[in-house]
Image: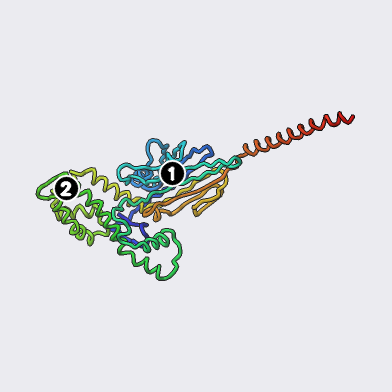
Amino acid sequence: MSHTGFFTPVMVVVASVLLQGCLEVNTSTRVRTDGSVERTVEIRGDSAEIARGLRMMAIDSTWTVARFDSAGKTVRVSATKEVVRASELSRRAGGDGSGCLRSDVTLEEHFRWFTTGYTFREIQRAWNPFDTIPLSRYFTEQEITLIKKHLLRKEPYASVEDSLAVNRMDERGEEWLSRNLFEGFFGEFIRGVAVLNDPAHTVAAVEAQKESLYKRVVPKAPLAESKALVPACEEMFGAGFTRRVMEANASGFERQRVREEFYEDASSGSYASNVEMPGVIIETNAPEVEGNRVTWKDYRDKAMIDDYEMLVQSRVVNWWAVVVTVCAAAAAVVVLVLGGLRRRAPLHGAGA
């Protein structure tokens, strides 16, 4: 598992083999005045990355998908979907939510007669599926604030001391991530042990070896992931028993495999999102604004450990309301003038 971008550069975990490709995901969203939304997701990568990218973005049979092969191993896939309500674009995953990048999408409409305001909001739920152990176990609140402020939001350091403090977090960062990966695997292993119910290897006996198993793996691998933990389990508990445990909880170990694969793809990919709004943009937290389109880029690091919000507001002039108001005002003036003329007509007659 490569580890590019997670807490970078706080947690630089050197993988034995770097990814040859790089998943690229670009999401374009168009909001219409009737509240409907069109979304296009473009994914680039090799064939294996494309398959995992489609799963991460929850692209299913409800999307219109086109595939474009190009020179070399790179493949481009474009998926489009139109929905009546923006909330239909929210991504939900079953179980622990490790199958796709989870998000909540909303569109609010604010009618003000002369204008209509639109507020589009998408919250990317923290991508990291391995969060059994909270950051607070390894970092103080002040350190977590420094990480989010300087490494994720890229704000400049207030002092040299802050910069040095962040650099000193490397080792604890690696330990936090590795422990979380281990917790995921070991949890599935224990569930398999419980199902197997082997008197020679009880749940209590295996749990007692938990720390020894972790320490057996860490010196050999930068991260305590399945490909390093399975051989370690075979050494500690025997190949036959380990195989039976994995067969007894096959769905659990498949879930762990998907989580690890998901983490690798999410943490090594490149992501960008843009939203085209009706009318004029009046507020957004996007770093790039061009006309009525806003763009967020390179938000992977932020989204890996914390919810990431994309917000944009626009305003449309209701010209029909302007016309109706002008016509109504003109009609009112005409009525007043005619009424005044009628009231004055008898006075002229009496004077004669």
Please determine whether, in this image, residue 146 is positioned above or below residue 85.
below
| Residue 47 visible in image | no
| In this rendering, position of residue 111 left or right of residue 163 | right
Q: Where is residue 110 in the image (x, y as percent from the top left)?
A: 53, 42
Residue 238 or 148: which is nearer the viewer? 148
Q: Where is residue 274 in the image (x, y as percent from the top left)?
A: 48, 48
Q: Which numbered tag is attached to residue 206?
A: none
Residue 340 or 266: which is nearer the viewer? 340
Identified by mark 1, the residue type is: Val
Alpha carbon of mark 2 to alpha carbon of mark 1: how far?
A: 40 Å
Of mark 2 and mark 1, the one earlier in the sequence is 1
| In this rendering, position of residue 299 left or right of residue 114 | left
Please name the residue shown 38% across and 36% down the image.
Answer: 61
Please name the residue shown 59% across and 42% down the image.
Answer: 115
| In this rendering, position of residue 215 left or right of residue 284 | left
Q: In which quarter of the image is the C terminus?
A: top right
| Residue 104 visible in image | yes
Query: What residue is shown with label 1?
Result: 105
